[in-house]
Image (tube, helix red, strand yellow):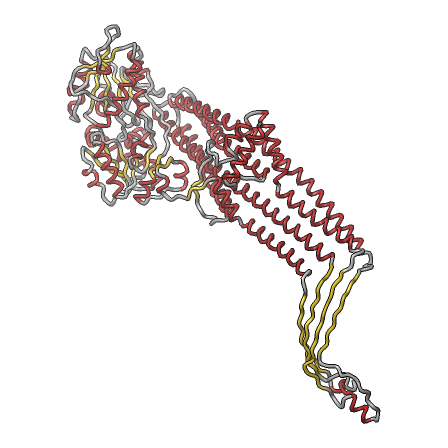
Amino acid sequence: MRRLHRGLAGLAVLYFGLVAPKSGQALAAGDEAAPVDLPALTIAIVKDGPSEYFDTITTRTKEELATLAEGEFALLYKEGPDYDAQWDLGRVETILRDALDDPEVDMVLAMGVLASEVAAKGDFDLTKPVLSGFVQDPDAMGMPYDQGGKSTRENFNFVVVPLRSTRDVRVFRDMVGFDELAIVCDSKLLEGVEDLEDQVVAFADAMGLRIRCVPVGESADEVLERLDDSVEAVYLTPALRLSAEEWQKLITGINEKKIPSFSLLGHEDVRNGVLGGLSPDINDRLARRLALNVQQILLGAAPEELSVLMNVDEQLMLNARTAARIGFSPRFDVMATAEVLHHEEMHLGDKLTLAEAIRLAAANNLQLAVKREEVEAAREDRNKALTGLFPQLEANARYYQVDRDRAEASAGFQPEDATTAGISVTQLIFSDPTMAAYRSLSRAYRGKGFEREATRLDVAEDAAQRFLDVLSAQSLYRIELLNLQLIQENLDLARVRFNAGVSGPEEIYRWETEIANSRGSVATMEATLRQALVALNQAMNVDLATLWNPRDIDMNDGSSYYLSSEFTDMISNNTKYEILQRHVLGQALENAPELKALDSLIEAQEIALAQLKRRFVLPDVGVSFTYDHKFDENFAGPALEEQLAGAGIPVPDGPEADEDEWMVALQASWPLFSGGGKAVDVAKARAELQRLQELRRQAVQLIEQRAYTAMFGTWGSYPNIGLSRKASEMARKNLRVVREKYAQGEVSIVDLLDAQNQAFVQEQAAALAVYQYVSDVISAERAMSWFEALASDPERALRREELRRILK
């Protein structure tokens, strides 16, 4: 196992050195003469060779040392060609020995992998304190340390991050998925580090990977030429002899070849175009740590008594611009836990804010479409009732034929067949039921409009709550992923402890169990997040499979919740809160569309009841006109006149009826008695009116309850934001301390599990606290029947001014 970790991590080294002046003379810190009243101490800086990478760290370290030594020591440096091996592997041991033998030198800084490897050898006598300032896997170079994280070499101290490269490759492989990995490594390290390539082969076998080392010197082109089409992924370790321009050229060339890349240096290289990296910018922390160690040694501490381990809070960073350029699409879980640069250049879902979600739902929700049609149907019912007050015109045409015997027997009164046509017009002069129905249906139509407004507000609240559900699920999912990552790091620590002999394999098994459980939790939270997205899409009536990039809630963003600072200012003060509570309650009762809808229904029922009472005395009055024209008729047998003449009966003279007939009628009718039905109708209408009035009283109570519940919710959830964040911060600090102690063998795995679980729970609580507060504010907005997201700028200004006014 020890050899396995040495394999890849041997390539993953961060050097930590100081800039050497052009000459080899000793200089005081700050290039000024040392004060005569301070003890002068000389530090020799031994380097593998010149490198631009060292320059920045050199400046930072000298600044830190100058600050720490001020008033205590006058620091002098011996550096230059005499202590620079110029990447000559044969000179490294010689110049380190010369520095130790120099009587003017009090301490040696071994600034490089090769110099540090020489100092770590058990057969190399260290007569003076030697510090190695590079960060690496302690097993990679066989660095001597014990279970407490202390150096086992007298007069030797170094700074390392355990299993750093191992985590890099594991995360990189999980993110991209590859079977062959090219590792770019300085050729001098491949030459100078004993058995390094053999260790890489052993690591590759254990990981189930094909790994090949690509040496780099002072030119990016020589590396790019070796990266052919068979390369699936590239892991970049520091190319110590490349200039900044050549390093950028290498990164650009890898991207042009569309090869995914990952950097040991981490975020610094990701900003320059590498696809991904875990390590934050730790140069300042490294400089401070080395300066503190130097100070402690100068004050009398033994180098081997200082801790050598340094834990780093890693965070995956991705460059979305690079991902888009090489055609790489990260998985959903990767994007959820990573910090993404240039997010806008990778289409992973359109941006969506809380206000936009509310507006989309209020415009598109299918429930609103149903309500809209209900309102239209009510409008047409009202219009239909109105048609009874207008003239009614009918046209008719008729042809009839009877049997001949019947026609003959009628003596000419009944034609055998006839064809007629006509029209009729009726006009209602007065009808109390018709006019009352129109008035009642008009109120019902208005009530439907208020019901639709209530539904619109419900839909807006539902969309807002679903948006918050997405944010909550996304935050919990991200926390689960980070917790999984932390468990994996703890597993790495357990392996370090096992390799150091401080613990048994049971700790490794325990962390592996935790990883399995955590992966199950991650899968569950991913499903919850996707379900929340589907629910949000349904509320907004968009394609249910649509992915969004929801904008998180910013407590300083006035568009995220009700009138921002004015509202939070009032709920943070007892007196103002009581005023605000009364204001919210008043607004809730004044604006509630539910009450307005019930008021409309009550008015409609009152009209219907009054009409039923009037029905006992008021008639329906109408006028009608009919006109018919006889086009043709045929008789069977002789007409009546002929029959009378044949019988010798004289036929009297008189006017003959023509083919046109018309009639005008004026009619008034009273329903005098219908078996008691009218009295029953009145009683039923009165009961229905009473029911509606009771419903209104109940609605008032529920609206008041909703307002009080929302306001009491904000009263508790707003201060909980700060308290939860404080608790989370303390839990993280506690976890950091316990992890340091666990790495040094001072606490058990149970202590670390407890600390991690506490930090995990508090992180969840802190994330959810903001969303709970905003949820309560959304509920308060719904209680007032007014959403800031749906209001215009003038309306928001008026509402803000109203809040200021009520405070006065």
What quarter of the picture does the C terminus occupy? top right
Q: Is residue 174 visible?
A: no
What quarter of the picture does the N terminus occupy? top left
Q: Please state the total of marks drawn on the protein image.
A: 0
- Counting from the top left corner in percent of width and height, residue 685 is at 75, 50
Q: Nearer the viewer, residue 630 or 454?
A: 630
- Counting from the top left corner in percent of width and height, residue 400 is at 70, 80
- Counting from the top left corner in percent of width and height, residue 151 is at 30, 19
Q: Is residue 181 visible?
A: yes
Q: Nearer the viewer, residue 279 or 365?
A: 365
Specify whether 671 is left or right of 164: right
Asked which quadrant contains residue 382, the reply is bottom right
Q: Nearer the viewer, residue 152 or 641?
A: 641
Asked which quadrant contains residue 734, the reply is top left
Specify whether 539 is left or right of 121: right
Vertical placement of residue 590 versus 415, above or below: above
- Counting from the top left corner in percent of width and height, residue 442 is at 65, 52
Asked which quadrant contains residue 111, the reply is top left
